Amino acid sequence: MGSTETFPGAASRSAQTSPGGAVLPGYYADPNILAIGDRYYVYATTDGYEGWGGTHFEVWESPDLASWTNRGTILTLGTDVPWASAHAWAPAAIERDGKTYFYFTAEQSVGVAVADSPVGPFREMLGRPLVDKADYGDGQQIDPAVFVDTDGQHYLLWGNTTGYVVPLDDTMAGFDPAAVRVVEGIDDFREALFLVERHGTYYLSWSVDDTRSEDYRVAYATGPSVYGPWTNRGVILSKDLEQGIRGTGHHSILQVPGTDEWYVAYHRFAIPDGDGTHRETTIDRLEFDDDGSIRTVVPTLGGVGPVPAPRAG
Ligand code: FUB
């Protein structure tokens, strides 16, 4: 695929890609969606490899959540990352002071890279993992997410079967190991933690089950702080067999800056013939009830949009 190939919105997308019309054409999983400046971005796992064997990361850019341009490869294991050469999974990004920080899984550890632009080029920062699998015993040290609290403090979350959260230091590439806390009290946690805040309530969400299962799904909990304590609220995204939608998980949540409009990006088995290593990325609306609970997401075949571009802050 060319590095700047553009794909249009839902109306004509289905003619070019799968009958499902996922937002991103091709195999992409574990999408991390965010707004930087006046564009939306999705950072994702390149999928379609046996054993999730991808070795590079790409980024997609959109003015409206409907039309997406592949801006090419932004980081390659081995070449750009000296400490790992396999299993490039589940990235996350955040903008801070004009730089984009990129957190990624490689060989079941978590690394960090930085760039002056959301589309790179990215430079690996440490020459070693930020979260080294050798330092943590439970589950896999995968699936980073980044969260900035209302006071400006940034946090890193990650984990599989055991979830972790820690404040990042101002370099965005370090933390105090003594400050790492285990995420306690959430039901059926497998992986893919994601945290947002709305009106003083913290919403922690995660994936349940195995990404190879059609029952892979997303659950959430609410709490009064980054650290909870968490009240489980149940499942918000799951399969819809009538539409042929299976394996809906490893999501991320976007708040359109300056609005109370929210979206969820997630992967599902590619339609029609996908499975747990042939997954596609799509986006749907995420809505809140008046009591602050998240409404069950209605998975669609065609995605969303177009919506207004984010206003550069
Ligand atoms: O894409 C590889 C792995 O599959 C991710 O790290 C998990 O979250 C699951 O989606």
Image (cartoon, rainbow, N blue to C red):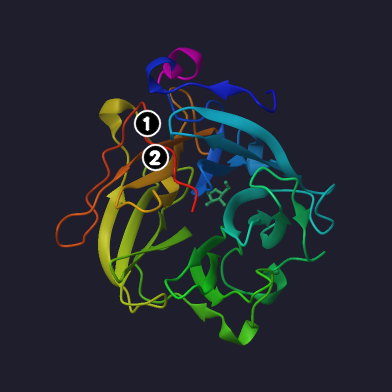
Measuring from the top left, give residue 281's x and y in whole percent.
Answer: 48, 36
Which residue is tagged 1?
303
Task: Estimate the spatial distance between the alpha carbons at disc 2 and disc 1, rounded to whole Å.
Answer: 19 Å
Q: Which residue occupies 38% across, 46% down?
A: 264
Looking at the image, which residue is at 21% across and 60% down?
293
Residue 214: mark: 2
Amino acid type, label 1: Gly
Closer to the camera, 225 or 260? 260
The quadrant of the rendering that contains the N terminus is top right
Q: Callout 2: helix, strand or loop? A: loop
Q: Position of residue 204 (x, y in %)?
A: 38, 64
Q: Amino acid at mark 2?
A: Glu
Rendered residue at 36%/52% (across/down)? 218
| Magenta-drawn stretch contains 16 | yes
Mark 1 beta carbon near ligand 1 (under 8 Å): no
Q: Which-is-in-front pick, marks 2 and 1?
A: 1
Vertical relation: 39 (above or below) 221: above
Query: Residue placed at 71% from the left, 52% from the top?
Result: 116
- Left or right, 265 with reference to 289: right
Q: Would you say residue 81 sits in the magenta stretch?
A: no
Which residue range is magenta in the image? 13-20
Ligand 1 within 8 angstroms of badge 2 C-beta: no
